[in-house]
Amino acid sequence: MFAADPAKRWTEKFVLFYSLAWIAVVVIVMATQAFAHWGDLGHMMLGVGLIVPLYIAPRFAPDGGQYLWRFNLWIGFYSLLQVYFGSALFFDVLHMQYHFPVTWILNRTPLFLYPMTIAYFTTYYVVMSLLWRAVPSSMKWPALLLLGYAVAFAETGGMANPWMRDYFSYGDKWFVLSRGSAAYGSIFALSLPFVFQLDGKASWSKIVLEVLAVNMAALCVYEVWAVILR
């Protein structure tokens, strides 16, 4: 299941291990609602704190971090673009609402959610890569669509929970779970093949251009979904 390349395999194992830590932190924060009195700075410290280990880890990777730095760039850049440009579908069509006690907001999304999304996406792509690698060649493309849908469904179900009812919600949770997950999942289906083939020798400029191209394709697909879901 793990990659044959030592650097990629090390990254996958590290991300899986670290995911247990950040997920535990998020669950505790949601269950206790400790963030209710943190304000902007406290929320931002949470968001940034969740991704700091991802940017320290390259120092310990077997290839000197060459692969992990590129992986971080791909996922980090794509995450930020999607949160900023892709959120319109969620606000305008899926009627997502944020009510966090913060004032630091960028394009209708609380600023601390930008780095938090990087942590989420990092875990998503490693899990999807592991599962996609295990799928027989004849089933790769159907599995790609299923993986994208499953990840979107899991995030929606996990975030729109009773603990977060006063801070985060959708107009119709079940509509978003069943149909909105297909729209959201499309961004993972489009991007996973590029993340999957990424290696430690890819040029930084190639990664940036690749992410920009995939992001534009994802936004175009979102426009189609917006017509379908309205």
Image (spheres, rainbow, N blue to C red):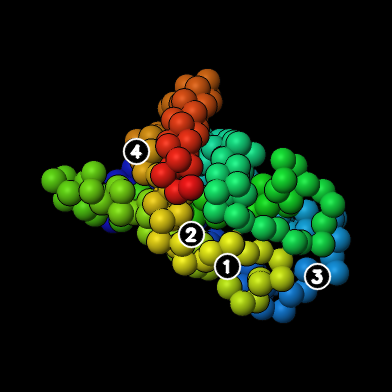
Q: Residues within 10 Å of mark 4 (few under 14, many from 20)?
A: some
- Residue 33: quarter of image: bottom right
| Residue 213 appears left or right of 3 | right
Q: Which dot marks residue 36?
A: 3
Q: Circle 2 sits on which residue? A: 176
Q: Mark 4 or mark 2, which is nearer the start of the sequence?
A: 2
Query: Three-letter amino acid code at disc 3?
Result: Ala
Q: Residues within 10 Å of mark 1 (few under 14, many from 20)?
A: some
User: What residue lies at 41% left-to-right and 44% top-to-bottom?
Assistant: 228
Secondary structure at numbered mark 2: helix
Between 59 and 92, the one nearer to me in the picture: 92
Query: Three-letter amino acid code at disc 2?
Result: Val
Asked if marks 2 and 1 touch (Cβ < 8 Å), the reply is yes
Query: Three-letter amino acid code at disc 4?
Result: Pro
Q: Measure the C-alpha gap from mark 2 to mark 4.
A: 25 Å
Secondary structure at numbered mark 4: helix
User: What residue lies at 75% left-to-right and 61% top-to-bottom?
Assistant: 99
Q: Residues within 10 Å of mark 3 (few under 14, many from 20)?
A: some
Q: Which dot marks residue 193?
A: 4
Between 78 and 206, the one nearer to me in the picture: 78
Secondary structure at numbered mark 1: loop
Q: Measure the C-alpha gap from mark 1 to mark 4.
A: 28 Å
Q: Circle 1 sits on which residue? A: 160
Asked if marks 3 and 4 touch (Cβ < 8 Å), the reply is no
